[in-house]
Image: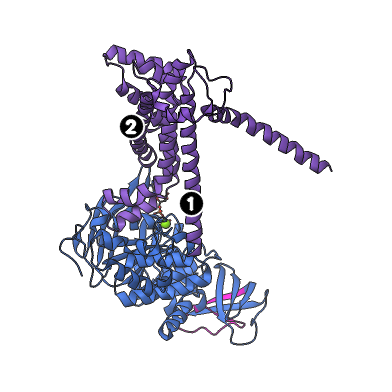
């Protein structure tokens, strides 16, 4: 009897926690179908119209496109640089090794406002005009730290004897990297890239300091909030969310299929 | 089957090449792992590098493979100086201690890796052939993680052998296997070496394994080669106390040389004259260390008549008897000489004497040996459970088994 009440308590707790996590997402999704006017706060009735007219809102799709562009570019840059740094930090013994390890933590520990303002001041001093380029630079900078930390763990778990075996089996340094090191690091690199994209895509603070006149999706919403957020914003947010869900499901299913195949053989 | 376009310059070796190390030293920051090592391994031989853990065996192999650079000295393979070349430029392959199979490739891809890198034709067919040699062709599409330890070991061997290296390096390849599998793999490795005719450099800390498999054994200690030779030679005529006790057991004594003839020296061991052939002694005057193997010593229950050419100790007292089927090991305390160990074949049922019995010990003077060590540093014989002098018998038995197989 006591056991059942305990079980029930756990269920209630789980339900509340999940509801707490999911209500904002559900709200966003539902209100993308709201037949609202300028203000998307009270339910006015169901419509598909907002999904069909996403890009009619001035600047919205452009901001979204900028976010995707910045996200992809800074992810590629940060992942490539961060992976190389991670390999160097784990594999090679050099003078400033531990100092660099420590310094790479700093951007993660520093408040974003400080980071964003500091960077903006530097751009001003050097005389670089703010725009897409400066956003990409800023995002690459703070993503590198996260990439290094993620990939470093993977490199550390890699048996150095595998690369030595590759060299012993007539692999040139390039072949050893692309055929042995890289494939074995892919799970870590992929995780780092996803993390980078997510961080870049929803960054507002640093972007706001370094974007000049260019809008990104988060910046657009922030500015729109002053006048009332159009339901089309909910449409894009919901679409991104659905895409993420689909990606996760596909990844899980294909992994399960692979596991099944390799255990069957 | 070498193609002139191979970048490595290494080719499919028709037969093994000889390896020569001259004055090789390897110093790590604050630690000398290898100290001016000289070593010659003849082509086509099965050579074992035997030594306790941490004596520098793996480091030696890594130097030969090119995975580590020597601090000093030259490395020659087949007469060619390879000291300054990269690993992929050397006609050498390694079976790693941890096997180091590529986890993201199938067994077949693992084995074909070296062939593909050198653009050798029919890589897949050759890989299948090598897998068939180690009887694992049926698992060629699996991944390493789906194989047992023994199977992984054989894949590692196939992956190295398929390249027909002039020199194959094996770093304790059987260390992770259980006893039965290890024994079986010892025979298989030896058979494969005979079949492919390559030079094998096999590293191990297991003296039995080294003696069973190798044509030549080099005993290594603290980064130096203590002694090198055929297993029988090392066993019958150890030159240092380390070799005498690392390969099997030995009874060691120290004493002053009191007489010397053209054929023999006589050493005073606690008042008892012990004769050792001059040819079997490293030192011929002053304080010396000498020894005799436990199975060469005969146990007597009565004082023997003095006889030329035999050394006698006694009377002593039996302090321990341990019966092990084929033979019995006796520990005998002899005043003045210390504790001696004696192996006796069990010709009758059970031990011939019991603990506490009064016995005499005798051996043919031709069987003794004189060591090169400074007598002050030679430890008295310490029975060591990890060393067994039945290794020679095991080797003979295994060789017979091999011939029948
Ligand atoms: N990279 C290294 N740096 C410092 N010391 C090392 C290094 N590699 C090996 N050593 C030391 O060299 C000695 C010999 O090592 P190793 O050749 O692996 O011995 P073995 O294979 O005979 O057990 C050991 O004491 C080990 O600690
Ligand atoms: Mg080792």
Colour blue maps to chain: B
Measured as percent of width and height from the top left, residue B344 is found at: 56, 80
> What chain does mark 1 sit on?
A
Residue A78 position (above or below residue A123): below
Residue B348 or A154: which is nearer the viewer? Answer: A154
Which quarter of the figure has residue B242?
A: bottom left
Q: Which mark is residue A7?
A: none
Residue A73 got which mark?
Answer: 2
Q: Residue at x 53, y 20 (%)?
A: A40
Residue with the mark numbered 1? A255
Label 1 sits on a secondary structure element that is helix
Report, in whole angstroms, how far the alpha carbon at label 1 lies from the one at label 2. Answer: 27 Å
Left or right: A2, with A189 as reference point: right
For disc 1, the neighbor class at 10 Å (few under 14, some 14 to 19, many from 20) is few
Q: Position of residue A179 (x, y in %)?
A: 32, 52
Labels 1 and 2 share a subunit:
yes
Magenta residues? B296-316
* Chain letter behind tag 2: A
Residue at the bottom extreme, as displayed: B348
Name the image colouring.
by chain
What residue do we see at 51% from left, 53% from top?
A256
Is residue B200 in view from this perspective? no
Q: Nearer the viewer, residue A259 or B116?
A: A259
Look at the image and give the colour of chain A: purple
Numbered disc 2: secondary structure = helix
User: Hey, which quadrant is residue B314 in on the image?
Assistant: bottom right
Which of the two discs, 1 and 2, labels the residue nearer the N terminus? 2
């Amino acid at each position: 009897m006591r056991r059942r009440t305990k079980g029930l308590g756990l269920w209630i707790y789980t339900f509340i926690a999940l509801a707490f996590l999911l209500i904002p997402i559900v709200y966003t999704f539902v209100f993308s179908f709201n037949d609202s006017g300028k203000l998307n706060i009270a339910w006015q009735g169901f419509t598909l119209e907002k999904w069909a007219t996403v890009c009619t809102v001035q600047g919205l799709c452009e901001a979204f496109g900028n976010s995707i562009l910045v996200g992809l570019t800074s992810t590629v840059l940060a992942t490539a640089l961060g992976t190389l740094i991670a390999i160097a930090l784990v594999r090679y013994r050099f003078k400033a090794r531990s100092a660099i390890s420590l310094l790479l933590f700093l951007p993660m520990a520093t408040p974003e406002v400080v980071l964003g303002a500091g960077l903006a001041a530097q751009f001003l001093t050097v005389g670089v005009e703010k725009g897409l380029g400066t956003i990409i630079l800023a995002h690459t900078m703070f993503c590198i730290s996260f990439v290094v930390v993620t990939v470093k763990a993977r490199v550390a778990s890699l048996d150095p004897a595998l690369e030595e075996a590759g060299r012993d089996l007539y692999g040139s340094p390039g072949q050893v990297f692309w055929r042995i090191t890289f494939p074995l690091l892919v799970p870590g690199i992929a995780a780092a890239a996803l993390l980078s994209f997510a961080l870049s895509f929803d960054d507002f603070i640093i972007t706001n300091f370094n974007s000049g006149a260019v809008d990104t999706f988060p910046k657009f919403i922030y500015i729109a909030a002053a006048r009332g957020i159009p339901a089309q914003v909910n449409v894009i947010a919901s679409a991104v969310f659905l895409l993420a869900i689909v990606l996760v499901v596909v990844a899980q299913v294909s992994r399960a299929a692979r596991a099944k195949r390799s255990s069957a053989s | 089957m070498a193609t002139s376009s191979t970048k490595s310059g290494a080719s499919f070796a028709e037969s093994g090449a000889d390896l020569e190390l001259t004055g090789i030293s390897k110093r790590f920051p604050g630690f000398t792992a290898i100290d001016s090592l000289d070593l010659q391994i003849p082509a086509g031989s099965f050579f074992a590098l035997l030594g306790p853990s941490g004596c520098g065996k793996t480091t030696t192999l890594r130097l030969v493979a090119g995975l580590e650079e020597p601090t000093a000295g030259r490395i020659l393979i087949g007469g060619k100086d390879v000291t300054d070349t990269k690993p992929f430029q050397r006609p050498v392959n390694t079976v790693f201690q941890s096997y180091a199979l590529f986890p993201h490739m199938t067994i077949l891809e693992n084995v074909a890796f070296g062939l593909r890198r050198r653009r050798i034709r029919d890589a897949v067919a050759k890989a299948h052939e090598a897998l068939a040699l180690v009887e694992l062709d049926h698992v060629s599409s699996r991944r390493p993680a789906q194989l047992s330890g023994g199977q992984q070991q054989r894949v590692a061997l196939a992956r190295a052998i398929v390249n027909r290296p002039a020199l194959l390096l094996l770093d304790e390849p059987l260390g992770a296997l259980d006893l039965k599998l290890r024994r079986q793999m010892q025979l298989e490795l030896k058979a494969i070496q005979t079949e492919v005719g390559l030079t094998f450099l096999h590293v191990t800390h297991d003296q039995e394994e080294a003696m069973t498999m190798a044509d030549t054994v080099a005993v290594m200690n603290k980064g130096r080669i203590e002694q090198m030779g055929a297993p029988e030679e090392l066993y019958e005529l150890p030159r240092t106390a380390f070799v005498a006790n690392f390969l099997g057991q030995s009874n060691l004594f120290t004493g002053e040389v009191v007489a010397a003839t053209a054929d023999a020296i006589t050493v005073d061991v606690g008042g008892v004259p012990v004769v050792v052939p001059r040819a079997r002694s490293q030192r011929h005057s002053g304080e010396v260390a000498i020894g005799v193997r436990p199975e060469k010593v005969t146990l007597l229950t009565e004082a023997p008549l003095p006889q030329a050419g035999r050394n006698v100790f006694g009377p002593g007292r039996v302090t321990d008897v341990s019966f092990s089927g084929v033979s019995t090991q006796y520990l005998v305390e002899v005043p003045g000489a210390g504790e001696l160990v004696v192996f006796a074949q069990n010709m009758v049922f059970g031990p011939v004497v019991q603990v506490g019995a009064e016995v005499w010990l005798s051996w043919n003077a031709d069987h003794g040996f004189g060591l090169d060590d400074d007598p002050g540093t030679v430890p008295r014989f310490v029975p060591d459970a990890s060393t067994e002098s039945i290794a020679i018998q095991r080797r003979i038995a295994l060789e017979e088994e091999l011939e029948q197989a």
